[in-house]
Amino acid sequence: MKTIVAFSLFLLACYTMSAQKIDEQIIEFDYVRLPLQLLPEGISGYSSQVILEYEEGILELQKLQTGDFQAALKDYEEKLVIAQSKYDSLMAIYKVEKEKAIARYDSAMVAYRKRPGVERFFENKILRDSERPYLILPSYPSVRFPYRPYESKEEYQKIFNKEMLADTYLKIDGIKKASTNAVKIVVTLLGYDFLDPVLRNESSNVYNSNTKQTTTVFRYWYEIAYRHPMNLKLLAPDGSTILDITFEDMTNYTVFKTQVNNGHAPGIDKHALKISFQDKVVEDNLIYIQNYLNDNYGYTWLKHSATIYRIDSKKYNYDTYQNAYEEIVSGFNALASDYNKAAEKIKAAIAIWEEELKTYDPADSKGRISSDIAIATNFNLYEAYLWTNDFDKAEKHLSKIIGLKPSKKEEALVKQYREFLKMQRQRMEMIY
């Protein structure tokens, strides 16, 4: 069976693991992670779509709101015309009556000044109010004009650019975008939910060694919960459903904790937080879905770090380990371009290490192959069998390590390798 691995291999700096001069070499190379599931036969591409389930409701509310505003605006304009017409009519009457009043006053003043004693009035500044005329103007027109309506700005959920989200996040690695023979990726955004910030606090007693006093210190912070559930569907070219899942993790609230302040609550901008979390949760969830798609259906290029151990000692000759190391590095380097050549090189390294393990004697603590070297050799064989797809033998050598009383670090490494081995076996068996 052939595994798919790429080039771009290089070595990182080595370091000594123990007093036995077991040198750990990290070899990095790119490889293609195979899918966990296969798409139906005949599918050669993908298309993608984002649906905002809440969009229609928001647009309808905005439409109704706009309709109400337009109706109110029309009513206002009609009432404004009536009021203006009434005002203009009353102003015309007012101007005529005002001119008449002024004319009457001017005529009365002329007659008033001609009366006996008028001159004495101006000289002695004696005002005979009962005889003096006054200007009495008509009342200024009063018309009640209507108030202009204003369009209220309701805060709705963000209507994202659906095409941009689909093009950015909804892809399957190793499969091209296509319009025919394509699996259709449909992600539905079910709606953003943002709960009001909740103020939390805790207290503790702090002793001051200088004053010999204990004081209670209160600490305050806000907790803000938000979520945006999403549904993922995969549809075959004939419209049948391949997958339909609403991710449970996305239905749970994510809780954000603000900075903690001593003595008083921290200041927050609720509106700014609401907007920022709305963008963040959509991006985070779509990245999650993108990773889910590629983990299950994609052919994704990843980087693998293989650990290979070399032995160096003045007491014994370990040239065979150097030879095996050179063989496996050459093999890893050829995996992308020539699998048969790569497998030949890796198997050459396997033959050397297997032969070395045959000389291991647990009872001989001072022998050429010590228990530490035996553990390192089994780790080497795990990596070698892993990349020749011989998973049973890779597991056998991990089990041998456990039987050699490894360190806690080595036990943890075996556990980590077994998880990777399990996934590689599962992916390979899905394809072949």
Image: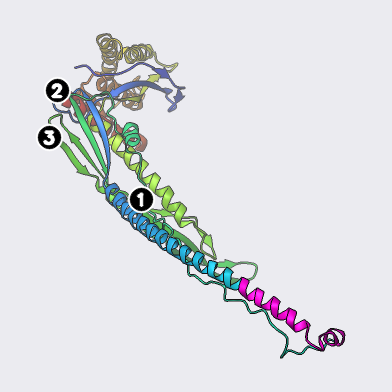
Q: How many marks?
A: 3
User: What kind of residue is marked 2?
Assistant: Gly
- Left or right: residue 376 versus residue 180 is right
The residue carrying mark 3 is: 240
User: What kind of residue is marked 3?
Assistant: Ser
> Which structural element holds mark 1?
loop
Give above or below for 78 relative to 244.
Answer: below
- Name the image quarter holding the N terminus: top left
Nearest to viewer (mark 1 / mark 3) = 1
The residue carrying mark 2 is: 42
Q: Does the magenta stretch include residue 176?
A: no
Q: Residues within 10 Å of mark 1 (few under 14, many from 20)?
A: some
Give above or below for 204 relative to 389.
Answer: below
- The spot of residue 265 in percent (x, y) is 51, 63
- The spot of residue 390 in percent (x, y) is 20, 21
Q: Label 1 vs label 3: CA separation?
A: 31 Å
Q: What stretch is highlighted in magenta?
A: 99-124
User: What kind of residue is marked 1?
Assistant: Gln
Can the viewer see residue 254? no
Q: Are marks 1 and 3 in contact (CB under 8 Å)?
A: no
Quarter holding residue 215: bottom right
The residue carrying mark 1 is: 157
> Which structural element holds mark 3?
loop
- Left or right: residue 72 versus residue 343 is right
Q: Label 3 vs label 2: CA separation?
A: 14 Å
Q: Which of marks 2 and 1 is nearer the N terminus?
A: 2
> Which structural element holds mark 2?
loop
- Name the image quarter holding the C terminus: top left
